[in-house]
Image (cartoon, rainbow, N blue to C red):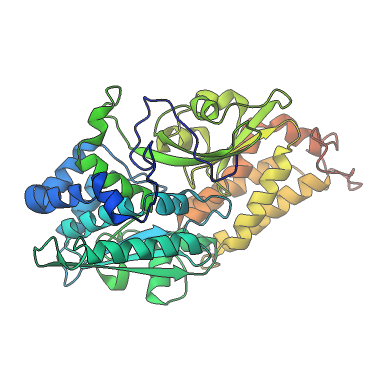
């Protein structure tokens, strides 16, 4: 088993992104056509038209995989309804989390679904250009995507004369190199414009003012790849799936103390326990202690949170996020305080520096985490940590700052004993940190 292993899931889980029977050759257009590729694009163009596509997506209940989980019907409608000289579609395949490869695995295994979904989006909002922003290091995914785009263009499914209708939809793949922040949609757009990568305040949303100031529909590859199956009536094949509550499926990458690490397609809303079961559970020699959910700016949830649903709202209330789709399972040998301190330091280092509360606040939070790990607390660090984290996230210009406080806040919420062990007793229960007694008066809370 490797991080890129695709894990089997129960038959009741809809598969919109990674077909249960993968194609022998993912770039073979003939094989993709035999499996139904571009049938939904034809249906959109011949039958549904722009309004029908938006209605079908709205009715499906599907939400974007992005941090806000915005219903995609509403997002497509906003972009299509904005009058402008030009519209753009952008596939955000940058995938910031360095430990997660779900998007690139999707592109490598099912490139035509991403292309077809983005072409349907372009037709729906009236865009002639689709730009794919992708990590320059994802060389396999870039090669496969470029090959598939060329084949789809030669087949007349995209390009100058889509399906012989006279419509033009041109794709270009734009490899990008940059920091963690490039995954944020307004930063990605700046990267595509060749500008310095710093987030922009929203609203105005990108659907009304995006790339080069034009209305832009931007989603990750997973959202676009689900669209063809949704339009083809895909979820109807899963009787347990209620379209009124269906938020779509998402690829999660499960790693750490599990029997079978890998990538799985799960419907939004299944519990963390069900996700853990897909990964074979925790081996007998380990004891489940916590789950880091949502990547480097995610939250650390205790073992008791296994009943929490994997969806935007439930995770948010529990103190985590869908984020990058990463779930790291932590056992008794992990120190929650050390982990939260390292994650906060990472987020502070990756902040773009545009706004002061984030630039300074995250660094001060990282210092608090480091002081606790080293056994050098200054006064009531837990109160200071909570107050500062809430101030930082309340003054956020972008989501990075809002989420970067989750790790420390969730540790303060769920692992108070472990914090106290470091601060008051100068011990690290997991044996990771080496807190030393602080000789200064009033150091411990
Ligand atoms: S909140 Fe942080 S990451 Fe976001 S724009 Fe401000 S400094 Fe940059």
**Position above or below: 428 against 46:** above
Which residue is drawn at the image coordinates 19% and 70% (left, top)? 86
Place of residue 90 in the rendered image (x, y in percent of width and height, measured from the top left): 32, 62
**Position above or below: 287 against 188:** above
Work out which quarter of the rendered image holds the C terminus and state it: top right
Q: Is residue 434 visible?
A: yes
Q: Nearer the viewer, residue 410 or 45?
A: 45
**Position above or below: 302 against 197:** above
Which residue is drawn at the image coordinates 26% and 54% (left, top)? 116
Place of residue 93 in the rendered image (x, y in percent of width and height, measured from the top left): 42, 58
Q: Is residue 378 visible?
A: no
Q: How many marks?
A: 0
Which residue is drawn at the image coordinates 72% and 41% (left, top)? 337
Side of 144 where 236 appears, left or right: left
Quadrant of residue 124 within the rendered picture = bottom left
Side of 248 where 368 appears, left or right: right
Q: Nearer the viewer, residue 143 or 83?
A: 143
Work out which quarter of the rendered image holds the N terminus and state it: top right
Which residue is drawn at the image coordinates 37% and 53% (left, top)? 221
Q: Residue furthest bottom?
A: 194
Place of residue 196 in the rendered image (x, y in percent of width and height, measured from the top left): 47, 75
Place of residue 318 in the rendered image (x, y in percent of width and height, measured from the top left): 51, 32
Side of 228 where 20 appears, left or right: right
């Amino acid at each position: 088993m490797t991080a890129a292993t695709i894990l089997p899931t129960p038959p009741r889980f809809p598969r919109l992104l990674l077909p249960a029977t993968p194609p022998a050759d993912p770039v073979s257009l003939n094989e993709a056509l035999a499996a139904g590729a571009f049938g939904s694009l034809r249906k959109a163009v011949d039958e549904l038209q722009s309004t029908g596509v938006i209605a079908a997506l709205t009715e499906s209940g599907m939400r974007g995989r992005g941090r806000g989980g915005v219903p995609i019907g509403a997002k497509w409608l906003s972009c299509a309804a904005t009058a402008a000289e030009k519209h753009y579609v952008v596939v955000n395949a940058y995938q910031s989390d360095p430990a997660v490869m779900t998007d690139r695995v999707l592109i490598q295994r099912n490139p035509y679904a991403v292309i077809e979904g983005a072409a349907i989006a372009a037709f729906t909002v009236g865009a002639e250009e689709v730009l794919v922003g992708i990590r320059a290091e994802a060389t396999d995914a870039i090669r496969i995507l470029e090959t598939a785009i060329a084949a789809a263009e030669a087949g007349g499914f995209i390009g100058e004369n889509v399906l012989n209708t006279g419509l033009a939809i041109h794709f270009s793949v734009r490899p990008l190199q940059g920091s963690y922040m490039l995954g944020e949609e307004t930063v990605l757009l700046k990267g595509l414009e060749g500008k310095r990568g710093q987030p922009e305040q929203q609203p105005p949303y990108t659907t009304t003012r995006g790339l080069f100031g034009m209305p832009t529909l931007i989603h990750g590859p997973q959202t676009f790849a689900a669209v063809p199956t949704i339009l083809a009536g895909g979820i109807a094949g899963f009787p347990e799936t209620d379209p009124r509550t269906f938020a779509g499926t998402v690829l999660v990458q499960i790693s750490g103390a599990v029997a079978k690490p890998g990538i799985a397609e799960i419907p939004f809303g299944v519990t963390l326990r069900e996700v853990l079961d897909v990964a074979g559970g925790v081996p007998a020699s380990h004891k489940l202690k916590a789950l880091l959910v949502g990547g480097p700016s995610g939250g650390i949830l205790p073992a008791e949170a296994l009943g929490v649903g994997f969806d935007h709202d439930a995770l948010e209330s529990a103190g985590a996020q869908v984020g990058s789709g990463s779930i790291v399972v932590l056992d008794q040998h992990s120190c929650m305080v050390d982990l939260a301190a390292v994650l906060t330091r990472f987020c502070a280092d990756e902040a773009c520096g545009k706004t002061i509360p984030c630039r300074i606040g995250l660094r001060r939070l990282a210092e608090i985490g480091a002081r606790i790990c080293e056994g050098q607390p200054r006064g009531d660090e837990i109160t200071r940590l909570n107050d500062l984290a809430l101030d930082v996230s309340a003054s956020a210009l972008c989501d990075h700052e809002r989420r970067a406080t989750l790790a420390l806040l969730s540790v303060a919420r769920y692992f108070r004993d472990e914090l106290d062990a470091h601060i008051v007793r100068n011990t690290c229960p997991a044996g990771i940190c080496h807190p030393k007694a602080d000789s200064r008066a009033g150091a411990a809370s």
